Image (cartoon, rainbow, N blue to C red):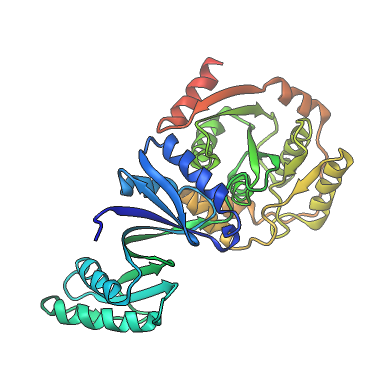
């Protein structure tokens, strides 16, 4: 058997018809993260990456959208006895003393059923690893999953398995849109915009300079998903009192008006019917349509998963602030001030970030020296 460990990428259900774009994004993210690779190619419904360092390559690839899961796996021939032998050898070596394990085999079975492989491999492991006291688990109760995926010609016995971010590959919508990050809920909205495949331009709006550090950290969690080596970000200050619901709604309205000043035809709005009143949302949509632009509402339909998405982009410490935002209770539609919009546009600072480990410092230094 070839002892090469491959990174195996399983596209999400919504990405099965977008695999070429996902392959393009995988090559880009590996280059951005300085991970050398020999090949990225398709094997049936999965993508096979032959990387110099599978662990670091897998970690980089798993930043991308459009992926159900990634694995580090060994390749074998899709042959009944061969598969059982390799699962017993490779999978058995992953077990620790007393662990319950579950053998799971999926994919294209040639002349046999996957259940027979699961049963045979489970029996072999129990027999050969009797000294470990390893016991078979169930779908609901196991310590270690020994997963194998079959393509037409090959079997991939997984050494490591990690869940992906879902969604569809970045830029697969082939439409440019603009979003603003100004707090936690807008960050999740921007994240969802990228997750839905839009080519996304980001601007950052703040009320006080004390907010910049937190916003820079939030931006740092999102920009790796854009699959770019470097990118431009614009920062604008909107001088509105940060206290009170009414002022917050004025702030959100002002941000929208600023977004409408850009040439982008699609505007991503950080508005959810679960947070904002339908009157407020309708008013915002009307503003967009009046400018002959197209609104996108990436938070529509997202409920408590909003908090899961926030954790996914490293906002665990900000959940209290997010909870406070989502408990807004008012039907008021305060208007924005044209003077505030004009004043904010004059504060615009455009900075270029080389995507890397020092993004937050680079953002802060660039703003300081601008």
Quarter of the image for residue 114 reads bottom left
Residues 74 and 366: in front is 74
Could you say where residue 91 lies in the image, as x and y percent from the top left? 25, 69
Quarter of the image containing the C terminus? top right
Could you say where residue 166 lies in the image, as x and y percent from the top left? 53, 58
Give the residue furthest to the top.
Answer: 369
Residue at the (69%, 54%) spot, across then down? 328
Quarter of the image for residue 116 reads bottom left
Residues 144 and 351: in front is 144
Residue at the (69%, 30%) spot, across then down? 238
Quarter of the image for residue 304 reads bottom right
Residues 247 and 13: in front is 13
Residues 57 and 294: in front is 57
Q: Is residue 107 above or below residue 25?
A: below
Residue at the (82%, 48%) spot, across then down? 285
Give the residue furthest to the right.
Answer: 290
In the image, taking residue 154 as reference, residue 25 lies left or right, namely: right
Quarter of the image containing the N terminus? bottom left
Could you say where residue 84 lies in the image, as x and y percent from the top left? 27, 75
From where the camera sits, is residue 143 visible? Answer: no
Q: Is residue 104 above or below residue 163?
A: below
From where the camera sits, is residue 166 visible? Answer: yes
Could you say where residue 272 lies in the image, as x and y percent from the top left? 70, 55
């Amino acid at each position: 058997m070839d002892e090469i460990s491959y990174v195996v990428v399983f596209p999400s259900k919504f990405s099965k018809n977008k695999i070429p774009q996902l392959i393009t994004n995988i090559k880009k993210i590996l280059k951005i993260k300085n991970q050398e690779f020999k090949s990225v190619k398709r094997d049936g419904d999965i993508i096979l990456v032959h990387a110099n360092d599978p662990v670091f390559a897998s970690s980089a690839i798993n930043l991308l959208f459009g992926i159900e899961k990634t694995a580090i796996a060994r390749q074998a021939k899709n042959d009944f006895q061969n598969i059982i032998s390799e699962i017993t050898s490779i999978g058995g070596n992953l077990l620790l003393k007393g662990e319950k394990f579950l053998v799971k085999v999926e994919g294209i079975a040639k002349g046999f059923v996957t259940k027979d492989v699961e049963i045979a491999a489970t029996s072999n492991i129990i027999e050969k690893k009797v000294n470990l006291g390893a016991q078979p688990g169930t779908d609901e109760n196991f310590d270690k999953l020994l997963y194998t995926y079959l393509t037409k010609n090959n079997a991939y016995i997984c050494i490591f398995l990690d869940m992906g971010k879902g969604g569809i590959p970045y830029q697969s919508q082939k439409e440019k849109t603009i979003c603003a990050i100004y707090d936690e809920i807008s960050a999740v909205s921007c994240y969802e915009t990228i997750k839905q495949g839009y080519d996304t331009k980001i601007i950052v709006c703040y009320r006080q300079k004390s907010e910049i550090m937190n916003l820079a950290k939030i931006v740092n969690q999102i920009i790796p998903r854009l699959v770019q080596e470097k990118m431009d970000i614009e920062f604008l200050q909107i001088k509105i009192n940060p206290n009170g619901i009414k002022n917050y709604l004025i702030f959100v309205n002002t941000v929208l008006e600023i977004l409408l000043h850009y040439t982008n035809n699609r505007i991503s709005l950080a508005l959810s019917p679960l947070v904002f009143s339908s009157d407020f949302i309708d008013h915002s949509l009307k503003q967009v349509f009046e400018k002959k632009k197209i609104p996108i509402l990436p938070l529509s339909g997202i409920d408590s998963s909003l908090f899961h998405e926030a954790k996914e982009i490293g906002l665990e410490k900000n959940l209290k602030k997010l909870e406070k935002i989502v408990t807004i209770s008012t039907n008021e539609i305060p208007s924005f001030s044209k003077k505030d919009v004009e004043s904010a546009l004059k504060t615009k600072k455009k900075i270029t970030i080389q995507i890397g480990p020092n993004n937050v410092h680079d953002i802060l230094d660039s703003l300081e020296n601008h």
